[in-house]
Every structure is written in structure tokens, then in C-alpha cells.
Amino acid sequence: MTVFVELYGRLRDAGVESPVELQLPDGATAAQALAALRARLGPKGALLEGSALAGESQVLAAEERLPESGRLAALPPVCGG
Amino acid sequence: MTIITERPLRVEELIELCAAPGHGAQAVFVGVVRDNHEGRKVDGVTYDCFVPLAERTLAEIAEEARGKFGAKIAAAHRIGRLAVGEASVAIAAGTPHRAEAFDACRYVIERIKERLPVWKQEHYVDGTANWLDGCALHR
């Protein structure tokens, strides 16, 4: 499956264009997507420390399968307000 | 009513939206961009946001405050680049009595800082910028 992961916050400084296209096994989990994203970021992969993957309606648990539709985003630690 | 917006926040509208005939109290919290952070002079702040999840999360937080405190909540978070002194977040809570209104405002701003998918990039007067640390999201 092909997914596109949007980058936010400090991940915008990772030196890659957002969204990032990833090729994953069918039924891939959030953890697999984050691992693939970390590999893609190479030496900037440490920026993903503490990040979560989310769909449009919720943050995904690590073992949760990626939603079949909608946007995906990698979310570093948040600091709104 | 909750909203994520690129437009300047209008606190008066939020106060009107949280009004009800049975309310004897309205409390308002407004967060603004300050001109310093840890000894550095700040020129402005960019608020980045994953909008679809932020809209849903802010609505959930407001609903939680309604359930916990019996409060009618109106809240708005601004995104984009803001100058010093501009409001980044505004929360209005209407309740029958004052204690719950204060508590509801406090609850909403604390949950925003913990859960809303928003990120601050500070811009300093020396021309540099920095993404601020925050709270990791989990589920």
C-alpha cells in the first residue's frame, strides 16, 4: 500500500517535502509507518522522537492498522495555547 | 462552539456564544504572544496545526468541560504567524456560578496544551527561529 504522511511542527525541518510517500505492506500499522518514515528521514530521523501517527479523527495506537482513507500526519509533541 | 482559524480572535463573540439565561458567571481566558522566552527577545510566533484532528480534539475538550462543570464553552485557537500581543487562544465559559466558570476555563486551556495538535515556532528578533518542546501524544 502507498500512503502519504504529512509533517508538522519540528518535522518540517527534516529536509524532506511534506507529505512523504511511503510504500508499506498491506494492513500496515502506525508503528510500521513511523519506522518507514524514520528510515526516510535518515540522519534527521531523531526529530521523530516522541512523535505519534494520526488520522483525521484520532491519534493511532502503535499496533493500530492505518485507516484506508483520509489524511495521515506525523505529530511531534504538541504545544498549543 | 469551537473553531480553529487563521483570523484574529474576537473574544466578544465567544462571550456571546457561551451566554445562557441561567448563567450567573462568564469567565474568559486569552493566551497572547509575549515578547520574550527564556531570555530571548521574541518577534512573533507561527502556530502550525493538523487542522482536521485539531477541530475534532478542541470540540471533544469543550464537551468534556461541559460534562465536568456544566459549562457552556466557546473556544478558538488561531493558526498562522502572529505578532507579539496578538491572541493565540481564547476560551469563554458560562456557568450558573463563578467557581465552575474559572475551573472550566482552566480545564480547557490545560487540555489544549496536552492534546491539541498545534506547534509553536518562535521567531526571534535576531532572525533565528525555534520549534518549542511540548507534550507527546499517546493513545
Image: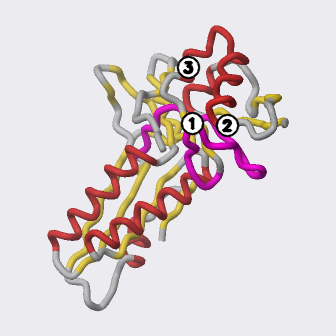
Q: Position of residue B112 (x, y in %)?
A: 40, 50
Q: Chain of mark 1?
A: A
Which amino acid does the dot numbered 3 rest on?
Leu
The main secondary structure of the magenta stretch is loop
Label 3 and label 1: CA atoms lie apart by 18 Å
Instruction: Please report the bounds of the magenta region as a residue range.
Output: A56-81
Residue at image coords 37%, 70%: B73
Residue at image coords 55%, 58%: B55
Q: On residue A29, which mark appears?
A: 2
Labels 2 and 1 share a subunit: yes
Q: Nearer the viewer, mark 3 or mark 1?
A: 1
* Circle 1: element type: loop
Q: Tell me if residue B6 can be seen.
A: no
* Circle 3: element type: helix
Q: Position of residue A65 (x, y in %)?
A: 68, 43
Q: Nearer the viewer, residue B7 or B116?
A: B116
Q: Chain of mark 3?
A: A
Reading the image, the residue beneath label 1 is A62
Q: Are marks 2 and 1 in contact (CB under 8 Å)?
A: yes
Q: Quadrant of the N terminus of chain A?
A: top right
Which amino acid does the dot numbered 2 rest on?
Thr
Residue A27 image-quadrant placement: top right
Residue at image coords 48%, 27%: A50
Using residue A7 as the reference point, say whether residue B78 is left or right of it.
Answer: left
Q: Chain of mark 2?
A: A
* Circle 2: element type: loop
In primary-sequence order, the first of circles 3 and 1 is 3
Reading the image, the residue beneath label 3 is A47
Residue lying at the far bottom of the rendered structure: B21
Q: Tell me if residue A52 can be seen.
A: yes
Residue lying at the far top of the rendered structure: A43
